[in-house]
Image: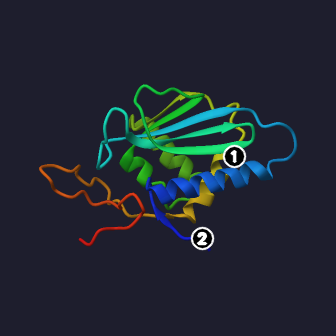
Amino acid sequence: MAEKSAFLTCAWGAALQEEAQRLLDRRPGGDVASFSYIAHFTNAPDPGTVEQRPGYRMDIVNGKVRVRLGIDERERANAMLVMDHDAAHATLTVRSGPEMDDLARLAFDQGKRRLDGSYDAMPLDLSALHDAMLERTSVIIPLGSPPRRNGEEALHADADGAVPDA
C-alpha cells in the first residue's frame, strides 16, 4: 500500500500526478486530448495569496500529466471546480457512488460547489482518480480550522506532509 499524505501537501500533489498518469496510461488506445483542470478550494484554513490560492492545476498534454499545487485566481482551464474547503474535505473518505453524488449535490445546492467549463473532453475518469486518491490521502486538516492570525500556527501539515505537534 502506498504511503498516505495530507491533502494539498507537496507529497499529496506528487501522488495525484502519479495516480492520474497511471490511469491515463491504462486508457484504451488512441491519442489523448490535451486538457486542463483546476480545483480551487475556497474558505480554506490558509487562504494563501492571490497567486497561490489553495488548490491545484492538472494539465494533460501529449499523454503526460503535470500537477501544480496552488493556483492563481486569474487562471483558466477547460474545467474549473470551485468548492468550499470543508465540503471538499467531507469527500476525502467517501468512495465514488451514491453517497459521493449526494455530497456533491448538497454542496452545489448550498452554493459550495460549482463547475466553470466542462469535463466533456477530460481524458481521465475522475471518479477512478478520486477513489485512487482515497488510498493516498490522510485526513489531517480539521474541518473549519481557522486561518493563521497574529503568528498563530494553523492546524495543517507542512509542505512535506508532516504534521506539527499540537
Reading the image, the residue beneath label 2 is: 2
Q: Is residue 97 visible?
A: no
Q: Does dot 1 land on a helix, a strand or a loop?
A: loop
> For the point 24% across and 57% down, which residue is it?
154
**Amino acid found under the numbered disc labelled 2:** Ala
Q: Is residue 18 left or right of residue 116?
A: right
Identified by mark 1, the residue type is Asp
Is residue 36 shown above or below 140?
A: above
Q: CA distance from mark 1 to mark 2?
A: 20 Å
**Depth-wise, is mark 1 or mark 2 nearer the camera?**
2
The percent coordinates of residue 40 (x first, y second) are: 44, 38
Residue 10: percent from the left, percent from the top? 46, 55
Task: Locate residue 27 relative to residue 13 in the image: left or right.
Answer: right
- Residue 85 place in picture, x, y as percent: 38, 46
Residue 72 position in % (x across, y down): 41, 32
Residue drawn at (67%, 53%) of the image: 128
Which residue lies at the image location 65% right of the left edge and 50% below the top edge? 20
- The circle on residue 14 is none
Tell me if mark 2 has few (under 14), some (14-19) or many (20+) residues whose alpha carbon lies within 10 angstroms of its own. few
Of callouts 1 and 2, which one flags the residue occurring earlier in the amino acid sequence? 2
Which residue in the protein does label 1 denote?
125
Residue found farthest to the right: 29
- Give the residue drawn at x 64%, y 56%: 19
Give residue 163's quadrant in the image: bottom left
Is residue 155 left or right of 17 when viewed as pictured? left
Q: Nearer the viewer, residue 8 or 146?
A: 8
User: 81 above or below 159?
Assistant: above
Q: Residue furthest left?
A: 150
